[in-house]
Amino acid sequence: MHPAFSVIFLTTLIGAGQGLFMALVTGQVYSLANLLAPQDSQSFYAMGALITATLLAGGLVAAVFHLGKPSYFITRAWRGMSQWRTSWLSRELIALPMFMLLVLAYAAVHYLGWTQIWFTIKGQIPVDASLVIGMLGVLMSVILFVSTAMIYASLKFLQEWHTALTVANFFLFGLASGFMLAAAFSAWMGIELVSFFGGWAVVFTVLAAITRAFSMLRNARIKHKSTLASALGIRHTKITQRSMGFMGGSFNTREFFHGQGPVVLAMARWFFVLNVFVFPVILLAASNLLESASLPVLAFVVQYLGLLAERWYFFAEARHPQNLYYQTVG
Amino acid sequence: MSQLALVIDLNVCVGCHACVTSCKEWNTSGWAGSLADQHPYDADPTGTFFNRVQSFEVGQYPNTETVHFPKSCLHCEEPPCVPVCPTGASYKRPDNGVVLVDYDKCIGCKYCSWACPYGVRELDEMQKVMKKCTLCIDRITDETLPEAERKPACVLACPTSARLYGDVHDPDSEASEAIRERGGYQLMPEWGTKPANHYLPRRKTRMQIFDDELERVDNPLKKEAPLPAAKGETLDDVAY
């Protein structure tokens, strides 16, 4: 497939945003259980939620450029919420704004200090508006992760994508980059949660490395169901295209191939393997030793750049069966 | 419920592209128009087409065969492009089974083109909406036209009648009969899309000739040859 930068930025930005929000709520829940020190509502939770909202808004801007015309965002995109019964893309278009609203509500509740305790569960767990909104946000974030990934995983003839590993990868990459960002944010703000978020970021990065390794292994040895024989219905082992019917290129020759040689593909693969899985972990380990405030930030930036390459590679490695019909100009 | 479709006879198609040009001509000026081209007279011309004719070589020289393969939307009975559309712009007409796009609802996200294994949907670069073969919906449903002209432009243009058109749910239609009696098949059946369009295979015309049909037993030329001379006693000597 042709990797569209709008979708690469959309999926990586909202992935990091969802992960960051889950990290914030995780921190809040841990502090309720007295496992972590409670943090300041305004400077930590509200600020963190605002960073999440900024990432989501960035993703939304990127998504606007994926539409045929950006003006369709105003005139037509609302229709995209209508087909949620059948379309994962429609479900994503509902989940994303709902998640954004919950994140903004979470930020507002923390910023305005509306954290009066509503009730306590079993006399131990105090429940306030921020916890309820936070939990709803986490739920919506999971729905959004699944919807985003299922857009790709539900296309059964794109066999490279049609696997549960796609959903696992999107989920774990989002969590890894989000917790990495939470660690970077904590380090920058001088909060004692760097090793907590950093530790989870490393765990999610390692899990993502495992699931991505499985999906790459799977894709390297994938056996495509469609062949030129089934595409034409001619039972012969040797069929060669002599003409695709035109010489000047078309939507079919532009949209379904990445247009790069094997060298670029291999470079992208090595770039993302090193930058997503290896360097951030080394940088976090170094920052743990040096107690640096900037190394976790660098770790997040490096991992995010790696994730851009990973998403590019994700699109490039999927081979669409329609390409069987477009092999020879003549 | 009817399902309108094309049946394309690969045994007859000569690859003349008349269906391609007549399709473009009709649809650029009709309901689905315009199908604008980008720099049509430049080095890198491109544009939206609903129908293409491709050519394939089957086999290894010298045992090869050229197959011309017209390719357009197959109007699947289980169209994978329709349920994925987030806006409902992509739909299958309930009355005649034609798969269409509502250009006023389409946001140009291209997801439906990813969801089509056949690659028959194209984003119009001028209107920025998804377009595809409409089976000339503005023509086949136009009751002001005489009955014989209520057919897709490609079908009317084909000089060898390689394209049959009809209701494949009606067992007595010309299309159904051709599929049934001449080995009609569907493309990429492995994905369960149930394409309504069918293709008729290439058929070899072979005469079966036996030696005695080439050489008559009572060939008069043979009578001209001298008879072998009798050696010794023959049947004639015994009889008389």
Image: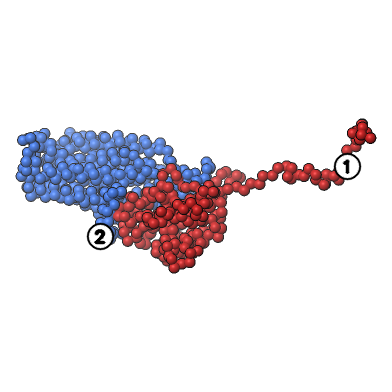
Instruction: Give the residue furthest to the front.
Output: B239
Where on the picture, by quarter, is residue A158? top left
Q: Is residue B201 left or right of residue A21?
A: right
Where on the picture, by quarter, is residue A208? top left
**Disc 2 is attached to a residue of which chain?**
A
Q: Are marks 2 and 1 in contact (CB under 8 Å)?
A: no
Q: Residue at x 35, y 55 (%)?
A: B90
Question: Can marks 2 and 1 be said to lie on one chain?
Answer: no
**Mark 1 packing: few (<14 Cα in 10 Å), some, or many (20+)?**
few
Mark identifier at residue A74: 2
Amino acid type of the residue tagged 2 in the rendering:
Ile
Amino acid type of the residue tagged 1 in the rendering:
Pro
Q: Tell me how far mark 2 sits from mark 1, CA to CA.
A: 101 Å
Dot 2: what SS?
helix
Q: Can the viewer see residue A116? A: yes
User: For chain A, what colour was chosen?
Assistant: blue
Mark identifier at residue B226: 1
Q: Is residue B12 above or below residue A299?
A: below
Q: Residue at x 43, y 66 (%)?
A: B143
Look at the image and tell me in which quarter the C terminus of chain B lies.
Answer: top right
Q: Residue at x 46, y 57 (%)?
A: B51
**In red, which chain?**
B
Which x, y percent locates residue A319?
40, 44
**Mark 2 packing: few (<14 Cα in 10 Å), some, or many (20+)?**
few
Q: Can the viewer see residue A300? A: no
Q: Residue at x 90, y 37 (%)?
A: B229
Q: Is residue A71 left or right of residue A196?
A: right
